[in-house]
Structures are given as structure tokens and as C-alpha cells.
Amino acid sequence: MLERSSSSYRRRWGRSGALGFVLPAALVAVVFAWLVGLVRVPGLESPVPGVHAQIGGVPAARLEAAKASLNAIAVKGRAPKTGYTRAQFGQAWADTDRNGCDTRNDILGRDLADPTFKEGTRNCLVLSGTLHDPYTGKTIEFRRGERSADVQIDHVVPLSDAWQKGAQQWTAEKRLEFANDPANLRSADGQANQDKGDGDLATWLPPNKAFRCEYAVDVVEVKGEYGLWMTQSEHDKAGELLAACRAE
């Protein structure tokens, strides 16, 4: 009788002891995640300096404007991709600003350090330069020719993504403007641009974490300016990224 009672006690103790161990362990895990910035507690910032700054920052006014813009962006599902071709957005790299240079060379000239130009092209045809690529953090030496594709021009909001989130309803003129808008274009590492494809914020982010804040702000600004919508997953990711941005 005594032995059964003792065994019963040990079984009961074992269950409650295990439970008592699991609960503190779970609590420790949550506290640790908060300390290193993996979870956010409203009104309570992680005490570890720089945890949220790892995705970079933007000027405070720009960040607040992006947050307001995100709140105004509609949330809908993707429309079918049916009918999408690059031609729906007009001639590739058209001279929409009428400065005599095509858009690709305009963006290369803007983004490359120490660009050189072909003589007689009114500083239009970029021959070489150095790209400090924000997407990867790499430094890439651009040379026109066989290695031209090492540096590509990325649409921050991809044309296919735009097509499925509102651009089908635009005029041809507006799609041409969008495809050549410098605010939606960035010189980037060719492989990173290929890896991105038509990914949105929910499916692709720059490998260089220090640039993710600015990238998210760029996307929100472009989508807000052109009235494009976001899927729920993209909208959630945009909110998460803006919340983690450092205001400068």
C-alpha cells in the first residue's frame, strides 16, 4: 500500500515537474527572442542596441510618409497574369524624358561611380563605371561588351507584379511611364536581379540586410504613387520591415 502510494506520488510529481520545467523554458525562449529582436512587444523595444537597425534606415520624414502610404494601399489578391508580356509596358528603355538618352543608360549614368561615356553620344552611352551594388553589397566593375549583363537595371516593383496588381487597367501611356520611371529603377547585380524575377516583398528581399529598409520604402513609395495594390502577405511583410527600420 505504501509502495503504491509512493509510486503514485512519483508519477504525479513527474507530470507536474515536467510541466513546471516546460513553462519556464517556453518563457525563457520568448524572452530570448525579444532580447535579440526576433519578436516585438508593443511599446517595449529590445534592449540590445542595433538589433532593428540591421535592416538599415531612412530619414525619419520619409519613413513616416511610407508608413502612411502603406496604410492607404489596398489589399487584394493577385489578378491573373493572363495577357502579360514585356511589350504591354511599351518599348524597352524608351527615352520618355526626351533627353536624347535611353532609360537604361540614364540609370547607369546615375548609379555608377566614375562612369565613362562613348565619345559623340552626348554622355549617353555608358562604357564603364563602378557599381556599389546595394542588393548584395558587392562592388562590380561594369564594362560594356560581353560582361554588360553583370550589371542590370532592376524594376523595384517588377512589371509582372504591377500587371497583376492594377496595371492591367492602365493606359498604354501610363504603363510606359511606369516602366521607365527612375524612381522604380535601380542598377543592380545581374544575378541578384535574375534571382528576384517578379518577386514582391513577401517572396524576395535583397541579400544585403542593411539595405532592406530602404528597399521596402522604395516599393511602398512606388506602389502608393501609382495606386497599385498588395496581397495580404506582401502588405504584412511591408509593415514588418517598416516597423524594423531605423529613423535617421
Image (tube, rainbow, N blue to C red):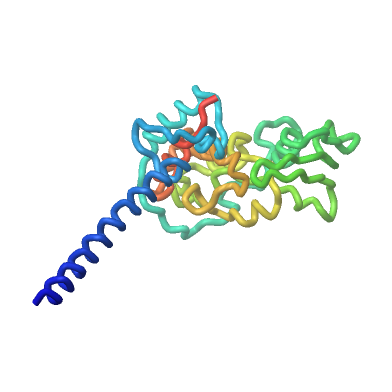
Identify the residue at image location x=49%, y=50%: 163
Query: Quarter holding the N terminus?
Result: bottom left
Q: Is residue 99 above or below residue 82?
A: above
Q: Is residue 87 above or below residue 212?
A: below
Q: Is residue 222 visible?
A: no
Identify the residue at image location x=85%, y=52%: 145
Left or right of residue 205: residue 101: right
| Residue found farthest to the top | 61
- The residue nearer to you, when weighing 62 against 40, is 40
- The residue nearer to you, when weighing 190 against 167, is 190
Pinpoint residue 185: horizontal percent, then vertical percent.
63, 40
Identify the residue at image location x=49%, y=28%: 63
| Residue found farthest to the front | 2
Q: Is residue 70 visible?
A: yes
Pinpoint residue 29: horizontal percent, then vertical percent.
39, 50
Number of marks: 0
Identify the residue at image location x=47%, y=50%: 202
Left or right of residue 212: residue 121: right
| Residue found farthest to the left | 1
Q: Is residue 43 above or below residue 126?
A: above
Pinpoint residue 227: horizontal percent, then vertical percent.
43, 37
- The residue nearer to you, when weighing 243 against 203, is 243
Pinpoint residue 69: horizontal percent, then vertical percent.
42, 32
Query: Quarter holding the C terminus?
Result: top right
Left or right of residue 1: residue 115: right
Q: Is residue 42 above or below residue 205?
A: above
